[in-house]
Image (spheres, rainbow, N blue to C red):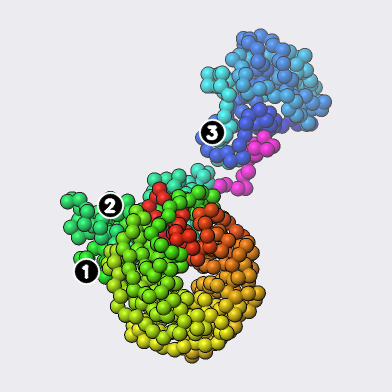
Amino acid sequence: MDSPPMDDIEEMVLRRFSAGFMAETTSTATVSRKAKRLNEGHNTLRRQTRFRALGYLLGGGSGSGSVGAQQQPSHPIISSPLVKHTFQHQNQSVASFDTASYSIISPPSIYEPSSSFDTTMSDDRFPTTTNAVGGESRHAGGAFHRRLLAKFLAGISNAATKDKGKVMDYEYVGEGFPLDGEEGELIDDEGCFVEAKQDPVGIDIISKLPFELAIHVFIHLDLQSVIACLSVSRRWRGFAQDSLVWREIFVRQPGWKVNATSAARQLRMARRQRTPSSSPSLPSITSLRSIPTIPSIPSALSCSSRRFSMSRSDAQYRLSLVPSCITEEEDYPLPPPDAVAPLCLDWQDLYKRRLELDRRWLKGEPIRSHLCGHTDSVYCLEFDNNKIITGSRDRTIKIWSLHTKELLGTYSSHNGSVLCLKFDETGFMISGSSDKTICVWQLTPKGDGAVVNKVLHGHEGGVLDLRMDKKWIVSCSKDAVIRIWDRKTLLPYCDLRGHEGPVNAVGLQGDKVISASGDGKMMLWDLLTRTRLRTFEGHDRGLACIDFKGDYIISGSNDRKIKIWSASTGECLRTLSGHELLVRALSFDVDSGKLVSASYDKTVKVWDWRTGKCLREFKGNHTSQIFDVKFDASKIVSSSHDQKVIVLDFGADMDTSLFS
């Protein structure tokens, strides 16, 4: 049987030894599934593997020795029971191995390169056999052995100097040899070639966008997301701190409102106090950012007054958004309370203060102050950000400073008790009295004075309640009649009749009027058709107070209950119980869900009318029946038979002058 050529034997040994050699070395190395494949590393590894295979085939061990010396290796390499070939050089046995079925038994470690080897092997290691056919020894000749020896010498010398004392890193082994991190095997896949590239690096798309588009993305984030964006990068922090973003967060909160008229007035004051280095036509940014800000429409990007320009600095951008009513002369009309808010103010600070204010409503203790000056029961009150106006059984109307609690003025025009009054931001005020008249007043610009312009007559009993808007004045009386007046002409429009008892309270919403009577009924009226739309029945006793906002009507009765109704369906949505005596006054806000009620039981209660839960109860402030109560974002003001007006302030140590 002919033996295979020497070159074929060499190639077979190299392939088999390389496969086993790789299995051991990769099992001892930490292999990553995401290994990078580099051609140079792959080729180097293959060369070193081939040389070491040949070296151990020729007898290279882990011990030291010299050429010609016999050495017993610690790792046998090849064994076979079948056909054997013997190579001899200079009449000495060099190597004997099987070619029919050979295998790698235990290849040596790559971490212990051999510095010397044996060129001869004894018959004990690789027994010499004779050819079965010719019976003579065969050898490859001196050329093959010299070539094999030269390759081995070069490989082992390189490995000894390059790898000594070094643990090889197989994380990047070269292209064409992907690593399997779980199995620890080096895979040579000739059927798939993939270009090795680094993992893709994240791209900050937001920072690549134009300023107005990036801001448009941020204004749709919730509060938690905006706060998280503050820590991403400087660029994102700038977006997350922009006033437009915080204004949108502010206006999304239910019930958070600010008086735009008061804000514009304060901005004008800041303009007059600007530093000489400031723009001659625009307010100082420094002074503006120290002033509370005002919310606007939910979709701020749709505001036509805003301008974006990437060529402007941030300060110029903010100044370009200041409403013209702030930058013009003093005679320029002030904006209405619900006008668009300027972005040049610190909306982030405004949000923080408003959030703290809401927390105090639930858990904080308000600062209590009282106004004394009336000589009899205080039946009614109204207040805004600067003043409180009260009406009393002593037939006077008094104006107080909300901030200093100082009495600004006392006015007498009625011949009976002042039972009700209303005023608005324009200074227009009306008051009703037990003398059956309605007085129309005009307050001075500073709110510290009042002049009677006209007295309205028509009721046959005392005027118990009043409501007004820009179009109508609605009055109700002890004579069971509801009278509608044209606000511009101050002439009667119509009378609404249907109640069987005194009409104690009325509400006005657009062209709809709701009335509450001592007969225990509520009636909804249409002012355009002058007809009654619906009658509400549900209270066990006469009604004392009512409030009408949006589609909701809330009524208080002598049955000690508060009921919430749907104006469109007439359904009673909820009944609140808690007061021990007649519910004399109430006021609520649709958006925030707050409802404040006052009773003859001398208590003031704060409710969430949407859930019916009583949030707070304040008792001990009055010593007698409470007749009226009003509230805004930071205060509750109540008046009583004890001649006092009590102010509960939840924001005494912060600027809340723009909140409403």
Residue 178 spot, x, y in % from top left = 60, 40
Between 122 and 353, the one lying in front of the other is 353
- Quadrant (top left/top right/bottom left/bottom right) for the C terminus: bottom left
Q: Give the foreground label among 1 and 3.
A: 1
Q: Is residue 188 magenta?
A: yes
Residue 423 falls left or right of residue 464: left
Amino acid carrying label 1: it is Asp
- The mark that comes first in sequence, 2 or 1, is 2
Amino acid carrying label 3: it is Gly
Distance, label 1 to label 3, CA atoms, is 83 Å
Residue 498 falls left or right of residue 371: right
Q: Is residue 396 magenta?
A: no
User: Start and end of the magenta stretch?
Assistant: 179-194
Q: Dot 3: what SS?
A: helix
Residue wearing tag 2: 287
Residue wearing tag 1: 331
Q: Dot 2: what SS?
A: helix
- The mark that comes first in sequence, 1 or 3, is 3
Q: Give the foreground label among 2 and 3.
A: 2
In the picture, the disc for residue 41 is: 3
Count of residue discs: 3
Residue 246 spot, x, y in % from top left = 42, 56
Residue 152 falls left or right of residue 349: right
Q: Dot 1: what SS?
A: loop
Q: Could you say which quadrant of the image residue 635 lies in?
A: bottom left
Mark 3 neighbour density, 10 Å: few (under 14) some (14–19) many (20 or more): some
Residue 95, compared with residue 641, is above or below; it is above
Q: Could you say which quadrant of the image residue 294 lies in?
A: bottom left
Residue 64, compared with residue 606, is above or below; it is above
